[in-house]
Amino acid sequence: MHWTRTLQRCALPLSLGVAALIGKNPAALAQSDSAPSNQSAASQSSGNEWWRHAVIYEIYPRSFQDSNGDGIGDLKGITSRLDYLYDLGIDAIWLTPIYPSPGVDYGYDISNYTAIDPIYGTMADFDHLVAEAKKRNIRVIMDYVINHTSDQNPWFIESRSSRTNPKRDWYIWRDGKGETATSKGEPPNNWESWFGGSAWQWDEKTRQYYYHYFYVQQPDLNWRNPEVRKAMYGVLDFWMQHGAAGFRIDAVSRLFEDPELRNDPYLPGHNAYGDRNIEHKYTDNLPEVHDVLREVRDVVDRYPGDPVLITEADEPNITELTKMYGHGDEVQLPMDFQIADVNQLSAPRFRELFKEIESNSANGQPEYFFSNHDQRRQWDRYGDGRHNDQIAKMMAVLELATRGTPQMYYGEELGMRTTDPTRIEDVHDPIGKRGWPKEKGRDGERTPMQWTPGPNAGFTSPGVKPWLPVPPSAREYNVQTESQNPDSIYNAYKRLLSLRRTNAALRDGVQTTIDNNDPDVFAFLRRDGNSTVLVALNMSAHNRQVNFDLANFGIHDSTLHPLYSSPAQPPTISSDHVVLAPFAALVAQVQ
Ligand code: GLC
């Protein structure tokens, strides 16, 4: 990949007729029956809470910045990079788990919810991070891992110690089928772990099975037990009192299982672990999840500062996603996995999904993301192998010029790519070991942040072995190099983040899809009072000639003034058409 192939630039003061486009010889042009969508401004939420206007930045602390030369990122490292984040223009950081953990699932197996893992620092380091972030107007969102603990958590150690222990019922213990004095029999039913194998683990000491949706070392909490709820709500209090701005709630749809233990239905085929595919009908999305979300909301709402709740729940459709908002009394920002996982540059699909979420019946605020610590990075996932940098910039516009709350993943702003291990011996993530080579695990999207072209990309001291290798692409794709190149992906993000902050329509405006039925160009308006911005994304590898019938939106005799465009050559905006280069993105003020 060479920088010369990846051009992009900022606002160009063009002033060409758009009104003249309307109705003019569109026959040879792209389909152009632009019409207002059925979205109504009233259906889109509004308000002044900080999270409506924020850009959230996910940090995987192990991989962001090492301050003590052990090859693992830490809290002091994050604090030392706050100026970078401030300068980039984000508003909040979400820290994936930093609590004491045996590290089987790299922090998602928690042995103590109210402390800091020494590998990351101390509670004083955390308090210092929050205070320094606050000085820069950056909020800190914590990860709330609610479905399961580590098997090394004292709660589970007690629970497994005897059938009569007071904490026995804090986890899901069941008898096996056909158990005898000498044999453990079969697991209670066919439920499967998301990470492979049965979801039931035999425990010889008390001769029962416990349930684990994820790894064996991650026993599920029993959310039907009121003491569990009380303890877990205490965790929220603890971090709110330490200055958290809210929580990202992990794996929330998995909280409850069918009390009758009915078998899940099988689906055709097998997964990467060799198990039969299964529909998690009785282990996912049970209605009781919403009672818990309301209770969690009640707890955080007692604190000032509009604390935010974000859910990780890969809801299969808009109806399920909408339920996460409740009646405004559950979650403010359920992550939109449907949009994240379109996984192809399909203008019709994005048009459809953005319309759906923008007109959701709960008036909920959308939350958009394309990469995270479980997903292969967007540079490769949406890249076509030839125009990846250009596509990365277009995806940045899709994420940052839309109305919802965007959530970035560290290094996305550089075009960091997924760099999988090449040998099973090098894999850290246990699912990669178990599923190799079909499933290589999640190491590839968790590699160290790329700060410089120098040794270890500036992530840790030279000569130290970082916990995951620095990808070779770090030599070109790093903060230092990219900040000197006006056409870099990094500078595209910086400009877009700054535009989003300063342009009223982009910051607050209602989003309306332009229904141009175009197979390649996804276009929409952002409107706030008298200010209108048009965004157009060419999702194809061809030049696309389009017009937008803005008269349908009550806009006449207007001109387009590009605020941002990529690639560097601004699109041709003439009296009867706009020509967008392959994978071009245009953000233009309509005047
Ligand atoms: C969530 C986390 C993932 C973790 C899993 C189990 O999906 O994002 O990283 O492995 O929960 O805790």
Image (cartoon, rainbow, N blue to C red):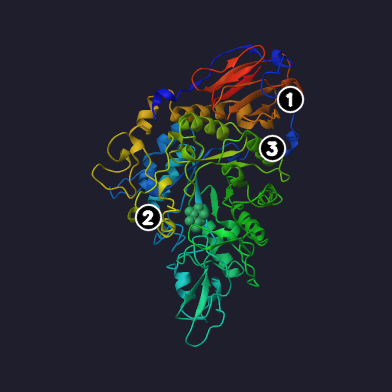
Res. 428 mark: 2
Residue depicted at 44% across the width and 73% down the height: 157
Residue 453 x, y percent position in the rendering:
31, 33
**Looking at the image, is 399 positioned above or below residue 180?**
above
**Looking at the image, is 495 positioned above or below residue 371?**
above
Residue depicted at 33% across the width and 56% down the height: 425
Amino acid type, residue under disc 2 in the picture: His
Could you say whether the residue bearing mark 2 is in a helix, strand or loop? Answer: loop
Could you say whether the residue bearing mark 3 is in a helix, strand or loop? Answer: helix
Amino acid type, residue under disc 3 in the picture: Lys
Res. 355 mark: 3
Residue depicted at 52% across the width and 68% down the height: 198
Q: Which residue is mark 1?
A: 33
Q: CA distance from mark 1 to mark 3?
A: 17 Å
Residue 48 placement: quadrant: top right
Tally of marks: 3
Residue 454 x, y percent position in the rendering:
28, 35
| Quarter that holds the C terminus | top right
Q: Is mark 3 within 8 Å of ligand 1?
A: no
| Quarter that holds the N terminus | top left
Quick one: 81 or 446, which is closer to the camera? Answer: 446
Residue 147 placement: quadrant: bottom right
Say which label, 2 or 1, has the lower sequence index. Answer: 1
Disc number lying in front (2 or 1): 1
Say which label, 3 or 2, has the lower sequence index. Answer: 3
Residue 421 x, y percent position in the rendering:
37, 49
